[in-house]
Amino acid sequence: MNRAFLRAAAAAAVIAAVPGAAPAQSIAITNAKLVLGDGSPPIDGGTVVIQGGRVVAAGRGVAVPAGITAVDAGGKWVSPGIFAGFTRMGIVEVDGVAATDDSAAGNTPFHAAIDVAPAVNPRTTAIAVNRAAGVTRAIVAPESRGSIFAGQGAIIDLGADMAAVTRPRAFQFMEAGEAGARAAGGSRPAAFAMLRNAIFEARTYARNPASFDDRGKDALLTRADAEALVPVIEGRTPLLVHVERGSDILAVLDLKREVPALKMVLVGATEGWTVAAQIAAAGVPVIASALNDLPASFEQLAATQSNMGRMQAAGVKVSIGMINDNEARQARLETQYAGNLVALTKVPGATGLTWDDAFAAITGRPADALGVGADMGTLRPGRRGDVVIWDGDPLELSTAVSAVYIDGVAQPLTNHQTKLRDRYLTPQEGAKPKAYEY
């Protein structure tokens, strides 16, 4: 047997052994207003077929294989699940309770080496709430404290089982701009000096890992941090950079010219529209804050709701993220944000996104930005069977989710909030169950 087969078999065995993990279903959803999530327009009368947890066909005129379950969508909208572009979901439960917050470590020698995957809790309240709103995958990033490097983030699924982490160590996250300056000692030049030194140290480690053990106090990176940065500087792991100000974006892009192998993704980018031509020329995707229209800091003075529309018009590949926007809980707002960007196209003087581009910005494009678009994010054949049935236009506030499938497995839509709603919807006399029972 070859090694790839053995690795795949081992991974399948691990997943099968996880408590609560359900087998993938073979299912065809027919008679759908089908959205593929790749920026193409909706398809009336579409069908999507899922077998072995993967999409095998999607479109109009697709035949339903014999012997599999067929679900008539009745003309409802059917789409890939929402791929949340930037969150801290699953690693934070209560912000004010340190024991439930694994987003950052304030007193540790490790930074780039930090891996959020072991901290992801599939039973975090926000996961069930966001799943019921159609979110099926999420980018989960650590938070920086004490260094420009926050650590290694993961891609998770929101399935109702204990196997949440789809891809551990999927990217490295770092802070530039104001946050990077604070972490580096108080100035942007110090942050870039720290970054360049880290690249130098990682290259030194890559050339001779054994010698790095003896560097001791002379090294500004621990051995573990240096090891974690090697796949970044070699272009095997994306580097997500939080940066807001236009001039800071240009400085970050200069770094890519110095280290061409870097697979860089900009996060936030409130002033991205001011340097959109340069971002597009560099071929760097952006996971933007969709609706920043007022400056929350001095690095966001050029904030405008037209930011994403203008970047898209300039040729930048844009998607929506939630950084500094209740990112541990409210990824479900991405459909609302995408809908608002569509509405901007109707506002004189504003620049928004078409419906097709707005929906792709919360499905296929964030997956592409992380380099996993061939595996998830759309309903193209071969992608994971993450499918949502909606009772209306997914970008309308009045629309609700009718069904969710993750990896071809039907998911429950109940959560803490729905149970509390049902409990008090028709109150009766008599003893009530304790709130913690929900």
Image (spheres, helix red, strand yellow):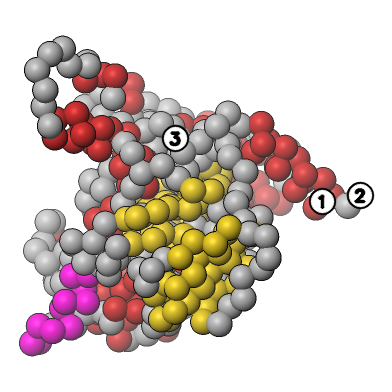
Circles 3 and 2: CB atoms closer than 8 Å: no
* Residue type pointed to by label 3: Pro
Count residues near mark 2 (Cα–Cα under 10 Å), then give few for <14, some for 14-19, many for 20+.
Answer: few
- Dot placed on the residue nearer the N-terminal end, 3 or 1: 1
Q: CA distance from mark 1 to mark 2?
A: 7 Å
Mark 2 lies on residue: 1
- Give the label on residue 122, or none: 3
Mark 1 lies on residue: 5
Relative vertical location of residue 52 with respect to residue 416 in this rendering, above or below: below
- For image coordinates 58% across by 40% down, the residue present is 22
Image quadrant assignment for residue 301: bottom left
* Residue type pointed to by label 1: Phe
Count residues near mark 1 (Cα–Cα under 10 Å), then give few for <14, some for 14-19, many for 20+.
Answer: few
Nearest the eye: 390 or 429: 429
Q: Is residue 304 magenta?
A: no
Nearest the eye: 360 or 75: 75
Circles 1 and 2: CB atoms closer than 8 Å: yes
From which residue to which does the magenta span run?
Answer: 338-349
